[in-house]
Image: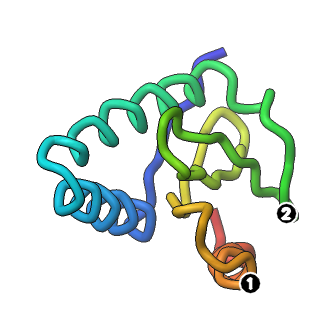
Amino acid sequence: MNYELIIRSSAQRDIAHLALRYNRKESGLGEWFIICLDAALQGLTRNAEIYRIVRHEYRKVLVKRFPVGVFYIVRGQAVYVDAVIDLRSDPKQIENRLRSHGDAEV
């Protein structure tokens, strides 16, 4: 089954911030991050339900070569990406981010 991929504005901001941060660290690293992220997102469109639920309805897929998790919800035939987070962040911050989205209507 192919799922429709919906990247919410909060996740789009996360992606832009992370890409900029990686490019500041090393020229071209932000572009490499986007390529690896795209591969993870494409995998979601084919196999969204294979990843385990980590909080309420949220599932997490890791971005290869980067300490980044993509947090998403599956509803019907759609995948809603709410957050793309550096997993080195304080776990309480991650929890708060997911809680702030958890009650949002899909």
- The Cα atoms of the two marked residues, 1 and 2, are separated by 13 Å
Relative height, residue 62 to residue 16 (above, below)? above
Most foreground residue, 22 or 70: 22
**Residue at the spot 65% in from the left edge and 70% down from the top edge:** 105
How crowded pointer 1 is (Cα within 10 Å; few <14, some 14-19, many 20+) is rated as few
Name which residue type carries label 2.
Arg
Measured as percent of width and height from the top left, residue 41 is found at 49, 34
State the residue lying farthest toward the front: 26
Q: Closer to the camera: disc 1 or disc 2?
A: 1
Measured as percent of width and height from the top left, residue 84 is found at 50, 58
Measured as percent of width and height from the top left, residue 8 is found at 44, 61
Q: Which mark is residue 92?
A: 1
The quarter of the picture where residue 91 lies is: bottom right
Colour scheme of the picture: rainbow
The reply to whether the C-beta atoms of the residues labelled 1 and 2 are less than 8 Å apart is: no
Callout 2 secondary element? strand
Most foreground residue, 33 or 61: 33
The quarter of the picture where residue 46 lies is: top right
Residue at label 2? Answer: 55
Name which residue type carries label 1.
Lys
Q: For the N terminus, which image quadrant?
A: top right
Q: Would residue 93 appear left or right of 49 to someone viewing this image?
A: left
